[in-house]
């Protein structure tokens, strides 16, 4: 098949969705398909276009298996919602023209969201080229932005809701990561063919990410010593209530056996760092190179996942499976009964507590820190679970089957 992919990130960009799309694409290529990727120039890590990629609005690379067209993403300050919206609009317009100029008719147009706006060029190109339209949803937008207060204007919300409904209804298939997200999307399309909403989870590369010794160079770099390392690794934004970490560190100011590590970047990092200036047990570390991910994951004794109240019904943190693949336990502050809490409870590979509940978070973390054997057992159970989970190739085969069905 000839597959046109429109996505916000692709290698060498380091965004998690870029890692996901790159792996899916590589396995589709291995299965013999021709792929043409329309994506952005690398920019995610520093929120500006990476060195070596600047100076051009548009770059196209021909490959043995198809092509990659990279476009200017118009990066802006993450805290400026209006500027980000304009940036998304500019990138979306470029993506439409880049996709329109692709030669030959694709069998399938495969589009990834967020940003939600990419659904429009995906649908238009699919209709113009008489191709199937598949819309992949990583996070439900605008739900997440509304829930964290990033968008509050009723007029803007109405426009985004209309765009969301339009995109879901006109796609030939909508793929989501969990049953929670499926229920969310099905509720929005109503009676119009809910069967077209398919659950295809993201994967974890269990060959690359494996249980390793915790005595790593990264652990030495952060000065962990023999302390128990409690780590949050990922985006530091409005969706993540990392005040839980700082408040717990304040309550434990007289403890010398724990080091809290916040590894990543985002719109809230500066504020949190300023708030944590008096906390000797809290360390902030910037994004690491992708090839260090197994080492970073292995350096923690407990990993944290945190989402604000209500967000777990519209977002599934992909880091969960990577942490479990590394054989480490998880403490999640998250809506109960959603995907992450179900996995942790059913497979006994971590603990989940209600979102933004400091007392429950502190108590559960203290229990994990003092139970070395149980942490090890949780890690082993988590690793066993993800080994049974869909591999990248199995996920690609699932997409291949969906594309063939529609095309």
Image (cartoon, helix red, strand yellow):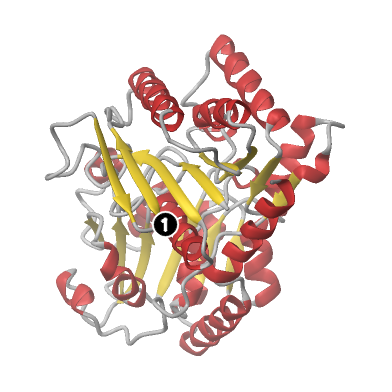
Residue indicated by mark 1: 22
Depth check, front residue: 179 or 227:
179
Question: Would you call the spot at circle 1 few (<14 residues within 10 Å), some (14-19), or many (20 or more)?
Answer: some
**Which residue is located at x 51 percent, y 64 percent?**
32
288 on left or right of 154:
left
Q: Quadrant of residue 286?
A: bottom left
**Which residue is located at x 15 percent, y 36 percent?**
54
Where is residue 125 shown, x and y percent of the image? Answer: 55, 29
Where is residue 161 shown, x and y percent of the image? Answer: 64, 22
276 on left or right of 234:
left
**Which residue is located at x 35 percent, y 73 percent?**
300
Q: Secondary structure at mark 1?
A: helix
Spot the residue most to the bottom: 373
On the question of residue 385 being in view, the answer is yes
Where is residue 201 shown, x and y percent of the image? Answer: 61, 59
Depth check, front residue: 129 or 91:
129
Spot the residue most to the top: 155
Depth check, front residue: 217 or 404:
404
Depth check, front residue: 287 or 302:
287
* Above-or-below relation of 1 to 204: above
Where is residue 255 shown, x and y percent of the image? Answer: 31, 70
Spot the residue most to the right: 191
Q: Quadrant of residue 388?
A: bottom right
364 on left or right of 328:
right
* Above-or-below relation of 223 to 279: below
Q: How many marks?
A: 1
On the question of residue 329 being in view, the answer is no
* Above-or-below relation of 73 to 154: below
């Amino acid at each position: 098949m000839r597959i046109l992919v429109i996505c916000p990130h692709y290698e060498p960009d380091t965004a998690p969705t870029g890692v996901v799309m790159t792996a899916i694409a590589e396995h589709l290529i291995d299965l013999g398909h021709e792929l043409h990727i329309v994506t952005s120039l690398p920019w995610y890590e520093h929120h500006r276009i990476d060195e070596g990629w600047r100076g051009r609005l548009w770059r196209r690379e021909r490959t043995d298996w198809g092509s990659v067209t990279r476009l200017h993403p118009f990066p802006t300050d993450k805290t400026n919602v209006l500027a980000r919206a304009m940036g998304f609009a500019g990138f979306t317009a470029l993506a439409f023209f880049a996709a329109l100029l692709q030669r030959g008719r694709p069998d399938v147009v495969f589009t990834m969201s967020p940003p939600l706006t990419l659904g429009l060029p995906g649908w238009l190109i699919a209709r113009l080229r008489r191709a199937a339209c598949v819309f992949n949803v990583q996070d439900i937008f605008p739900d997440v932005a509304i829930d964290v207060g990033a968008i509050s204007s009723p007029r803007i919300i109405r426009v985004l809701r209309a765009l969301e409904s339009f995109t879901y209804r006109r796609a030939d298939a909508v793929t989501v990561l969990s049953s929670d997200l499926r229920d969310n999307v099905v509720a929005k399309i109503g009676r119009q063919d809910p069967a077209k909403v398919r659950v295809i989870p993201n994967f974890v590369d269990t060959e690359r990410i494996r249980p390793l010794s915790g005595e790593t160079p990264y652990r030495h770099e952060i000065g962990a010593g023999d302390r128990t390392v409690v780590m949050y690794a990922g985006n530091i934004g409005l969706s993540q209530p990392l005040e839980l970490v700082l408040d717990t560190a304040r309550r434990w100011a007289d403890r010398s056996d724990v080091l809290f590590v916040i590894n990543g970047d985002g719109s809230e990092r500066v504020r949190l760092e300023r708030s944590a200036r008096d906390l000797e047990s809290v360390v902030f570390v910037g994004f690491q190179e992708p090839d260090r991910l197994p080492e970073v994951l292995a350096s923690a004794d407990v990993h944290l996942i945190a989402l604000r109240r209500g967000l777990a019904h519209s977002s599934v943190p992909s880091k969960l499976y990577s942490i479990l693949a590394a054989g480490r336990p998880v403490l999640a502050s998250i809506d109960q009964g959603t995907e992450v809490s179900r996995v942790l409870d059913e497979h006994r590979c971590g603990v989940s507590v209600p979102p933004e509940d400091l007392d429950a978070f502190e108590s559960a973390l203290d229990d994990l820190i003092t139970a070395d054997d149980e942490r090890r057992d949780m890690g082993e159970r988590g690793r066993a679970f993800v080994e049974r989970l869909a591999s990248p190739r199995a996920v690609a085969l699932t997409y291949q089957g969906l594309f063939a069905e529609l095309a």
